[in-house]
Image (cartoon, helix red, strand yellow):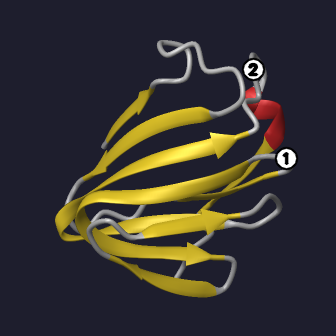
Amino acid sequence: MEFRLATQALELEKSGLSYQRVPPDYRFPYGHTHKKQEEVYVVVRGSGRMKVDEEIVELKEWDAVRVPPGTWRGYEAGPEGLEILVIGAPNLGGSPRADVDGQRDWWAD
């Protein structure tokens, strides 16, 4: 799993940006939700699935999924892996963890 944050490097004031590369057939072990932040997930390469509250969304290259505040989400890569850009707003500045709740094994089959 590779995770890179670009928010500080780009000096973003109103939004956040991250890149995530997920290995083939890997399910991210935590689901999470934000109290204030809206996120858009854009698939750059690969495929997978995303669970948004109780809905399962199939992901393929250049799909985009909007996740509003207060919505749980988690994702898993398909057989070729998954690369995604995540854009979030508003930018939560120095205390982004105060906005997030997470739960291990939230997406259980």
Residue behind mark 1: 36
- Residue at the location (48% across, 83% down)? 57
Q: Amino acid at mark 2?
A: Gly
Quadrant in the rendering for residue 2: top left
Residue 13: where, in percent of width, then height?
A: 69, 20
Q: Is residue 20 above or below residue 64?
A: above
Q: Quadrant of the N terminus?
A: top left
Which mark identifies residue 71? none
The reply to whether dot 1 and dot 2 touch (C-beta < 8 Å) is: no
Indicate the secondary structure of the residue bearing disc 2: loop
* Left or right: 12 in relation to 90: left
Residue behind mark 2: 93
Q: Amino acid at mark 1?
A: Lys
- Residue at the location (42% across, 58% down)? 42
The mark tally for this picture is 2
Indicate the secondary structure of the residue bearing disc 1: loop
- Residue at the location (61% across, 87% down)? 55
Residue 15: where, in percent of width, then height?
A: 66, 33
What separation in Å lies between label 1 and label 2 (alpha carbons)?
12 Å
Residue 43: where, in percent of width, then height?
A: 34, 60
Q: Nearer the viewer, residue 22 or 107?
A: 22
In terms of sequence position, does the residue under pointer 1 or pointer 2 come before the other? Answer: 1
* Left or right: 41 in relation to 11: left
Q: Nearer the viewer, residue 29 or 85?
A: 85
Q: Nearer the viewer, residue 90 or 32?
A: 90
Around disc 2, counting alpha carbons within 10 Å, would you say few (fewer than 14), some (14 to 19), or many (20 or more)? Answer: some
Residue 102: where, in percent of width, then height?
A: 70, 52
